[in-house]
Image: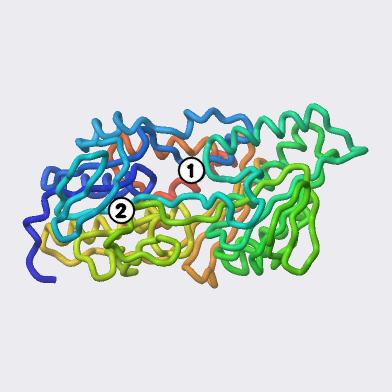
Amino acid sequence: MSGGSSDIRRVVIVGGGLAGLEAALYLGTVLGDDVSITMISNRDRFVYRPFLTYLAFGLSPDRIEIDLEEFATQHGIRLHVGTVESVDPQRRIVEFNGHSLAYDALILATGARSVEEPIPGLRGGHTIWDRADMLRLRERLTEEVERASPERPTRVLFLVPPGNAWSGPVYELAVMTASWLAEQGVRAAFDLQLITAEHRHVEAMGEKVGERVADSLAFHGIHAQTGREAIRVEPGHVVFEEGTDAGFDILINGAVYAGAGPVEGLPVDEEGFYRTRMENRELQSIDRIYAVGDGSDFPVKQGFLALLQADAAAEHIAARILGRDPQFTFTATLFWLMDEFDQVLFARGERDMVSADVDNFAAGKLRRLETMGYLPRQQRLGNPLYSGLLWKGTDIGLSLIKNLESDR
C-alpha cells in the first residue's frame, strides 16, 4: 500500500446499530485521538436485535437496549439523532435534519427496513422485526395459554417467506415457543408448524446445520416443511405456490428486507442495498464511502456478519490513515447460537458451511440469555466485539458457559 491518507481525520458513521457501534469502537481502539468520530442515528437507543426473540417470553426490553448518548459520551463520539436525507460524494457532505456535516471517510451502517407486505396479505402476522412485534406476540401467547384446550389446539404457524435473508430467528422462536409452552404445562394444547420457502432448514448455514435443526424441530414436536413458497395470506390460512394452504390461529413470520439509507448518487441494487467491494466493504466506484451490515449487498443479513463487515471497513480506514496494509479483510463467516431454552444449538463455519462446526450443549438455567451482559460490558470498556480476531472471544465465552454448566 502507498503512503497513508493523512487527510482522513473525520469519520462519520450513519447508523447506531450493531455494525455502527462496532465500527466506532474499532476505530477508537486502533486510532485513538488520531480520528474524530461522529455518529448519526435515527434513534437514541441501541437495540441488540439478536435477542428480540426473548421479548416474547417475558424479557424486559431495557435488558437489550443501550442509551446511545451515554455510549457516545463514554467513547468520545459526537452523536446526532436524526435522519440522513442525502450524501454528496463529490463534496463529501452528509445532509441530515436540515444540517450539513463534512466527512473524510463515511461508513453507512444504516441497517435495513422490513418490507411491509412482501406477499399479499402478509401484514397481520407477528413479524420478527422489532420490540413492538415481539411484545404484541407476548400478549397473544399469554392469552392463548390462559384459554388453552387440548380439545381444540391453537394452531401456530412459523413462516419463512420467499426473499427472507436470514431465517435463523424464525427457527429459534419456534423451538423457544415449544419449550416455553411445555414449561407452562400446555404444550399439548398447541399445534406448531414451520414452513419455509428455503430448500433446507436455515439454508444459509448449510446442509449439516439444516439436518441438526430438523432434528431439533422433530424433538420439539414441530411439524416442518421445506421448499414451499407462500404466495398470499388470507384470513386464517396461507396459500402456497403449488395451490395448497395451511391454516393458523397465530402467524409468526420472518422479515423480508429492503435498503433503508439514502440512495441518490450511490450505487445500489434493485432492493436498495449498497453495492460494495467484498473485501473491504467500500462502495463500488466511490472512494471513502463504506457500507456494512444489513444495508449492504451481502445476501445474508445476520448480526455476526455485520460485526465482521464493520471491522473490515474500519480496518481499511485505519490502514489508510496509518499508511500500512490492512491486517485483515472481510471473510464471510457465519456464527449462530439457537437457544431452545433446554439446550443450545451452536454452529459456525465458512460461507458454504461445508466444514461447519455444529454442536448442542445443555444450557440449563444459564442459557444464552445470561451471556448478553458481554455486549454492554465490551462497549463500556471500549473494546470491539470481534475486531477481526473472529473466534477468540467466542471460544472463550463458549468454554466459560460449558465449564459453568458442568459445575452445576
Helix, strand or loop at mark 2: strand
Residue 211 visible? The answer is: yes
Q: Which mark is residue 108?
A: 2
Locate residue 173: give its quadrant: top right
Which residue lies at the image location 49% right of the left edge and 57% below the top edge?
Answer: 335
407 to 331, vertically: above or below = above
Q: Does 6 sit left or right of 405 as displayed?
A: left
At label 2, counting other C-alpha atoms closer than 10 Å, the crowd grade (few under 14, some 14-19, many 20 or more) is: many
Helix, strand or loop at mark 1: helix
Q: Which mark is residue 93?
A: none
Instruction: Provide residue 108's location: percent of width, then percent of height.
Output: 30, 53
**Cβ–Cβ under 8 Å for marks 1 and 2:** no
The C terminus - image quarter? top right
Instruction: Provide residue 94's location: percent of width, then percent of height.
Output: 21, 49
Instruction: Give the residue furthest to the right.
Output: 151
Which residue lies at the image location 50% right of the left edge and 45% below the top edge?
Answer: 50
Q: Does 307 sit left or right of 218 as displayed?
A: left
Instruction: Provide residue 251's location: percent of width, then percent of height.
Output: 70, 46
Number of disc labels:
2
84 to 357, vertically: above or below = above
Locate residue 390: give its quadrant: bottom left
Q: Earlier in the sequence, mark 1 or mark 2?
A: 1
Residue 366 visible? The answer is: no
At label 1, counting other C-alpha atoms closer than 10 Å, the crowd grade (few under 14, some 14-19, many 20 or more) is: some
The nearer-to-camera label among 1 and 2 is 2
Which residue lies at the image location 45% right of the left edge and 62% below the top edge?
Answer: 271
- Please state which amino acid type lies under the numbered disc 2: Leu
Residue ID for mark 1: 49
Locate residue 357: give its quadrant: bottom right
Which residue lies at the image location 40% right of the left edge and 64% below the top edge?
Answer: 297
- Please state which amino acid type lies under the numbered disc 1: Arg
